[in-house]
Image (cartoon, rainbow, N blue to C red):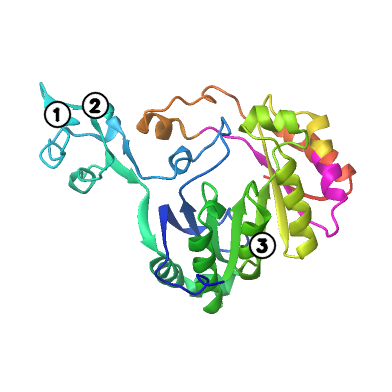
Amino acid sequence: MSDRHDRSVTGIVTDVQHFSIHDGPGIRTTVFLKGCNLRCFWCHNPETLKMKSELQYFPDRCIACGACVPPCPTGAHAIVDGRHEFDRALCTACGACAPTCFARALVMAGETRTAGEIVDEVARDRAFYETSGGGVTLSGGEPLLQPDFTEAVLAGCLELGISTAIETAANVAWHVIERALPVTKLVMMDIKSADSEAHRSATGVPNERVLANARRIAEYGVPMIVRTPIVPGVNDDEASIAGIAAFLAELPTAVTYELLRFHMMAEAKYAALGLVCRAAGLEPPTHETMQRLTRVARDAGVTVHSA
């Protein structure tokens, strides 16, 4: 793999989150990459969907200081009657305004960084990984849409003795996944539905490739956690979870199954990108629903964790 140890490989990163406890075992650093080829209407990281940098504008943070006006080459920012006005149609996401905004009302989503920079940043917290059994997790978006960068970061971390994990929807060609597996100690993948049409309706794509890749990952032997976000109206019924659990029970190696309680805490991020949040107002599943679905999955013979 020619790029596996290349620290100069670049990728587009939205965030590096330190001291994460929800993206794998122990204390972890989670690196969020840009780009996703699913369009789940409940996505809580909309800033990672597009494979390019974007400007987020949070009007509630704005103090109308006007510092963003001079550097903008297209006139997208203006102060009118003491108020900041932003014309998104004029914005090219060049990012010139963001460094001037001390209130962080203007924030770039997506920064080009090298694999070496990310590995060095991740390595700063090695002591916490060693004492907690943690490591680094590459998430997104879909990290496997940036395969060279993903492989280089994982390989660099592994060389330093840092345990590695990826969070993926596995909706990519098998050869892309196969490249990453030798430098991945844990795969956490989503399966939203075992029914292809239901999967297409919820995410925009069918699930045949997702399920086929899940089988091949299990055959490869890398430890795997399969996750299902429980979304009302999508998969919060017993038949949906029974279908996924039955599929998992037939895999050649045992996997851990996690049921994740849907939440909608990303409405402000949608607004900051000029997007409509299609899951706005959707209530999360009740505790009773989560318990019931957990029992359904366990009855199928899989090991289940419910969050």
Q: Confirm whether the magenta stretch covers residue 261.
A: yes
Circle nearer the viewer, 3 or 1: 3
Circle 1 is placed at which residue position?
A: 78
Looking at the rendered structure, the kind of residue marked 3 is Glu
Q: Secondary structure at mark 3?
A: helix
Q: Which of the 4 image quadrants contains residue 155? A: bottom right
Circle 2 is placed at which residue position?
A: 87
Circle 3 is placed at which residue position?
A: 178
Q: What is the crowding at mark 1: few (fewer than 14 residues within 10 Å), some, or many (at least 20)?
A: some
Q: Secondary structure at mark 2?
A: loop
Is 298 left, or right, of 190 in this rendering?
right
Q: What percent of the width, then of the height, locates residue 236?
A: 73, 30
Is 111 left, or right, of 154 in this rendering?
left
Q: What percent of the width, then of the height, locates residue 195?
A: 77, 33
Q: Confirm whether the magenta stretch covers residue 158.
A: no
Distance from label 3 to label 1 (Cα)?
A: 49 Å
Distance from label 2 to label 1 (Cα)?
A: 9 Å
Name the residue rendered at 46%, 43% in the picture.
48
Residues at circles 2 and 1 in contact by the CB criterion of under 8 Å: yes
Which residue is nearer to you in this view: 2 or 232?
2
Q: Is residue 28 visible?
A: no
Q: What is the crowding at mark 3: few (fewer than 14 residues within 10 Å), some, or many (at least 20)?
A: some
Total marks shown come to 3
The span shown in magenta is: 244-264
Looking at the rendered structure, the kind of residue marked 1 is Ala
Depicted 245 relative to depicted 2: above or below: above
Which residue is nearer to you in this view: 111 or 1?
1
